[in-house]
Image: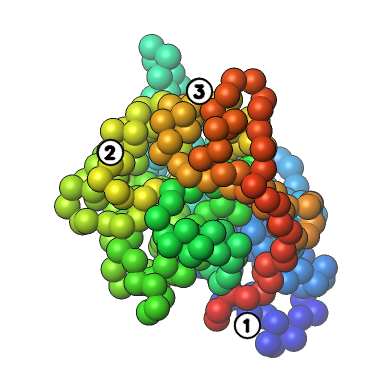
Amino acid sequence: MKYDISVKKQYEEEYGFILSKLPKKIGDGILSFLDENSFKHMNEIRIHKNSEVCLMADFKNVKTNITADEKDMEEILNSLCEGSVYAHFDTIKDGYISIGRGIRAGICGRAVCKNGEITGVCEINSVNIRIPRMIYNASEKIFEILKKEDFAVSLLIYSAPGVGKTTILRDLIYQLGKENIQKRISVIDTREEITTCMKTPANTDVFISYPKGIGIELATKSMTPEIIICDEISSKNEANAILKAVHGGVRLIATAHAKNFSELKSKDILIPLISSGVFDYAIGVSRKYGTDKYEYEINDLRKKDHHKGGNSMSLARRSIFTTSIGDTGK
């Protein structure tokens, strides 16, 4: 490895916990690859059986010369589960393993099904480790909308997978908890991804591993939040539970997968929420490949034409800004 002591220390501090979960040849190989190619940050590690390890580094998909075989995959799975695959059975069948510090490993293999339901996963052939990061001011433009509206609106933030919705939620939690704001917040952190890599502000209550609908209902009843935050509305049951639970002036900030607004408002799971006026704004986030330049599409759902059929849509405004990926606050 050619890196100097300071760079080596930076890599090891930032990625040491994650790389300790991998076979030594893979962990050491990733450190060498990052240095040789002068990457500043790593966002994902994608490991495929009998193929090259791939990374998302500095917002680019790159292939290394490191190969993982079947024995490596078995070692990785055992390490991620801390020696007990059974203890992680429920999340494995849902496609992931939580390994601590807000880090989630996606799991892909052969599904075992019964009566149309997944009862297990075997023959693991790929693992995707997503590395969460706290980026201060990532939500700057979205926070400006909240502030302008006196924090009395609900937001639905959407993008394609991997763009940075959860990172934006983390920064919103931080911004809303500042001394001059101090909003009461309940965070429904179903997959332990949102808050476990950050210090949550005072007045922030975190419901870990609660199903979204149940968490929102309990938060509303018992914690008197002003704002409820959750990630990835992904099923009709969740949407229906949210529709029932959000009442009495509580505001909601949530995310959803959609590449554009037309796709968002055509999703069956979201139609009841949008048409019933749960959200005041739908905010699209996109990023040009290989850069940290974000484009925000701001849609005011209070405009009547958003509720018409077809692809009718008007944009309140659009703005482009750059978030410094290095501004982690460390």
- The residue where tag 1 is placed is 9
Which amino acid, mark 2? Ala
| Quadrant location of the C terminus in the rendered image | bottom right
Front residue of this view, candidates 323 and 8 = 323
What residue is at 68 percent from the left and 67 percent from the top? 323
**Which of pointers 3 and 2 lies earlier in the amino acid sequence?**
2
Q: Relative to residue 286, is residue 241 drawn left or right?
A: left
**Which of pointers 1 and 2 lies earlier in the amino acid sequence?**
1
What residue is at 46 percent from the left and 29 percent from the top? 275
* Residue 252: % across, % down: 39, 48
- The residue where tag 2 is placed is 245
* Residue 262: % across, % down: 65, 31
**Number of the front mark, 1 or 2:** 2
What residue is at 40 percent from the left and 55 percent from the top? 152
**Number of the front mark, 1 or 3:** 3
Which amino acid, mark 3? Asp
Q: Tell me whether the residue at label 1 lies in contact with that at label 3, contact meaning CB atoms closer than 8 angstroms.
A: no
Q: Which mark is residue 268?
A: 3
Which amino acid, mark 1? Lys
Front residue of this view, candidates 40 and 184 = 184
Cα gap from disc 1 to disc 3, whole angstroms = 48 Å
Q: Relative to residue 306, is residue 55 drawn left or right?
A: right
Secondary structure beneath disc 3?
A: loop
Residue that extends furthest to the front in the rendered view of this protein? 304
Q: Quadrant of residue 245?
A: top left
